[in-house]
Every structure is written in C-alpha cells, then in structure tokens.
Image: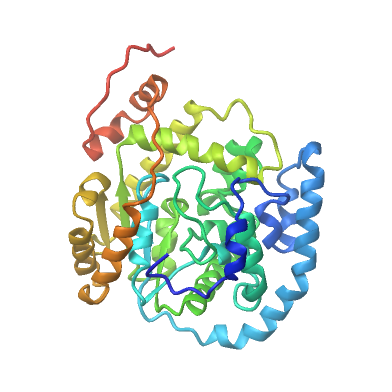
C-alpha cells in the first residue's frame, strides 16, 4: 500500500495468499503463555476448540524465547524513545469510516502507527519480522472479509488487536470468547471496572505498544485507530496530556448493520467458544447505543480545540480538502508535504470493489428503538418501517 513505510516481504510468496479468514490457531498465538492462562481463568474454552487452543498455546510457548530476546535486546532503546508530539486518537464506532481516516493519516511519514504485524505479534515486532511477516502474510486473506480492504502485515491496524495479546483484559476478548460477550462488555471495556493492579498493568502495556510502534514505523506522532478507546477517553487524556481526538460518524442504520456483519465475519477465524444465539442484531444495536452514549458523556471533558468531529458522508465529498482542514485544526504539521501521498492513496482505492448490503427492516426497527436520540444528536434522518416492535 503506497504511503506506508514498509519492509519488503518475500515476493515469491504473494501468489499463495489465503482466501479465507480461518486459521488453525487463534490470534492469541502472538501472546505470552501467562496472558493466555490469565484469560482462561475468566473465560472457558469449549471442548470442540480444545485442539485449537492447544495449538495456540504451543505456538505462544515456542515464541517465548523470542519474546525474552526482544525484551532484553530492546529494553534500553525503548526507554530512550520520547513522545514529543501528542498522540491522535480516532474514536469513531466500528464501521464508521475509521479505517479510511487512519490510512490517510498514516500516509504522513511523521506518523507512527500499529501495523497488522505488530497487532498479531506485539512481543516480537522489533526483532523477528524478517521471518514471521512472510509466513503470516500467507495465512491472511488478500482482503478483509467484511469490506474488501487489502490486508498486509505492514498496513496500519487498530491497536486493540495488539492489546488483546498483551493484556488479560480487552473488549476484543469477545471475538475469542463470544459466549461471554455480555460479561466482557461489562467487566473488560471500561477502565473504571478494572482493579488498580489491572489498570496499572494495562497502562504499562499500552505505553509499551505505542513505543514499539514508533520504533517500528519510525514516526514521531502516534496515530491511534481504536473504537474501544471511546470507553477510555478520560483515561487517555490523563495518560497523554494534550492528546487529540477525532470522532468520525456515519448513518447509524448502516453502522449497526455493518457492525453486525463485521463481528460475525471475524468469529470463525479466532473463536474458542460457539457464537450464542443471544448475539443477534438486537444485542449489536444495543451495544452500539451504549458505546455512543458513552462518547456523548465524555466529549465535553475534552478541550474543544483537541477534538474534531467528522461526518463520513461529507468527508467523502472532498477527502483531500477535509484532510487539509484536519491538519490545520489539530496542528499536525504542513499539509502540502503529504498531500501528494494522500491523493495517490485515494486514487488506488478507487479501483477497490466495495461490498454491498441491504439494511433489513429489523435493523431499522432496532435503531429506532434503541438509538433514536443518537439519530437526533448526529442529525440523521429517521427511517420508517412496517415492522412493529414486540
């Protein structure tokens, strides 16, 4: 992908790329064994997935020696990485345009970001990329199953996929343990529910992840794309004084339906529990409403000059012009120096085949039921349906 600073993969492996989002192990293969065991104390693996869990733990165990090597070899270097520029956190809800915005911001050579490789192997990102990246590129599908965006180990990635490997607590545990979705939302999403010990360890691991991202990509300003961070806005302001926030939003009907499809496309590749029947559109829309209401309660805590809100449909009418405005409002540096990179990236995206889907009346009904106030606050037209609420 043009615009990103990337180490070349082994070219002869490219034609062998996987076409499916299914793996013999879960994403926890890049974790440490101690973290995996900590998760199993909270979440039970279903017997039908025992072998997948065994392979996952085996791979993590084999990688422990490399994890130890990286901690020893890079410890001193990591302590010398300064964060001289405040980070930028993209906090839109899933499927709201966060990926496009993140990719555009990462066209800037000054940007540091979590790559897909770091998200999968956050413990060895600095030392083992020469052999691990080509192998994992073989296992990844060429395009993400839910939106046809090209996948590659060097592409920008939301850091929660890395944090689920670094810490026992993460909202993304629900991809692995979908039967525990409600408990994970309640106990692992909001920092205020953590014990002080868990909170301190989470902050330490998050800073470590950002430091490694800066070393890995060579950037000096960290750009985060992580919908989970909506629930952490007060904590992030405390951890990173002067941090900037970008909230991007999209029509709630489209977001709710797309989110439901997105989550269900991820489950087959990583799950260690069956998906319960209770994870349906009703639950997905209620989760959307819950997280969005958290955002509205937190945004007034942010200094107005440190927050930009973007409407996705308006942004797409003039992405280059809107990126220029974003640079100016958040003081991200000279826009003219990155304009050409952004234009080149956008031109390449014009050839991408986009997924199309219809919004069922059930989703319209549920959004009207649970998120009517969000429609009003974000100024989206209410859709009508012939289906009656039960």
Q: Position of residue 261 (x, y in %)?
A: 49, 35
Which residue is at the front of the view, 147 or 52? 147
Q: Which residue is found at the position 75% from the left and 49% from the top?
A: 41
Q: Nearer the viewer, residue 292 or 334?
A: 334
Note whether 248 is above or below 85 in the view shown. Answer: above
Query: Up-down: is 313 above or below 209?
Result: above
Among the 4 quarters of the image, the one containing residue 250: top left
Q: Is residue 190 left or right of residue 177?
A: left
- Position of residue 239 measured from the top left corner of the image (x, y, whole percent): 44, 68
Quadrant position of residue 212: bottom right
Instruction: State the residue at coordinates (38%, 38%).
Output: 255
Q: In the rendered view of the protein, which quadrant contains the N terminus?
A: bottom left
One can see residue 235 in this view: yes
Q: How is the image coloured?
A: rainbow
Is residue 243 found left or right of 72 in the rendered image?
A: left
Numbered disc total = 0
Residue at the (43%, 31%) spot, across then down: 285
Residue 209, position as x, y percentages in the image: 54, 69
Q: What percent of the width, then of the height, locates residue 3? A: 37, 70
Quadrant in which the C terminus is drawn: top left
Near-viewer residue (225 or 349): 349
- Front one among 97 and 310: 97
Please tell me whether residue 203 is drawn above or below residue 145 in the rendered image: below
């Amino acid at each position: 992908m043009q615009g990103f600073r990337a180490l070349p993969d082994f070219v002869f492996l490219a034609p062998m790329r996987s076409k499916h989002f299914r793996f013999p192990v879960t994403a926890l293969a890049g974790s440490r064994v101690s973290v995996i065991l900590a998760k199993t104390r909270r979440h039970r693996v279903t017997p039908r997935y025992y072998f997948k869990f065994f392979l996952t733990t085996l791979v993590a165990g084999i990688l422990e020696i490399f994890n130890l090597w990286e901690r020893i070899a890079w410890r001193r270097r990591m302590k010398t990485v300064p964060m001289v520029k405040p980070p930028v956190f993209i906090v839109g809800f899933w499927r709201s345009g966060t990926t496009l915005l993140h990719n555009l911001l990462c066209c800037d050579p000054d940007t540091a970001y979590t790559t897909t490789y770091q998200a999968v192997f956050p413990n060895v990102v600095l030392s083992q990329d020469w052999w691990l990246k080509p192998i994992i590129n073989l296992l990844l599908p060429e395009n993400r199953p839910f939106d046809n965006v090209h996948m590659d180990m060097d592409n920008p990635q939301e850091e929660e996929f890395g944090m689920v490997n670094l810490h026992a607590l993460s909202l993304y545990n629900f991809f692995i343990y979908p039967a525990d979705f409600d408990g994970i939302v309640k106990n692992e999403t909001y920092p205020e529910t953590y014990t002080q010990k868990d909170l301190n360890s989470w902050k330490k691991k998050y800073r470590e992840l950002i430091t490694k991202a800066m070393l890995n990509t060579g950037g000096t300003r960290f750009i985060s794309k992580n919908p989970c961070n909506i629930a952490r806005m007060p904590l992030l302001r405390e951890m990173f004084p002067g941090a900037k926030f970008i909230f991007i939003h999209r029509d709630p009907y489209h977001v709710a339906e797309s989110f439901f499809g997105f989550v269900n496309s991820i489950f087959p590749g990583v799950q260690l529990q069956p998906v319960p029947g209770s994870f349906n559109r009703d639950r997905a829309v209620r989760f959307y409403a819950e997280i969005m209401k958290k955002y509205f309660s937190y945004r007034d805590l942010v200094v107005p000059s440190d927050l930009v809100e973007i409407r996705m449909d308006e942004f797409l009418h003039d992405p280059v012009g809107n990126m220029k405005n974003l640079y100016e409002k958040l003081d991200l540096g000279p826009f003219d120096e990155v304009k050409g990179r952004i234009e080149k990236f956008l031109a390449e995206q014009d050839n991408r085949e986009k997924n199309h889907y219809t919004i069922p009346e059930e989703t319209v009904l549920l959004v009207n039921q649970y998120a009517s106030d969000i429609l009003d606050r974000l100024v989206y037209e209410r859709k009508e349906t012939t289906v009656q609420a039960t």
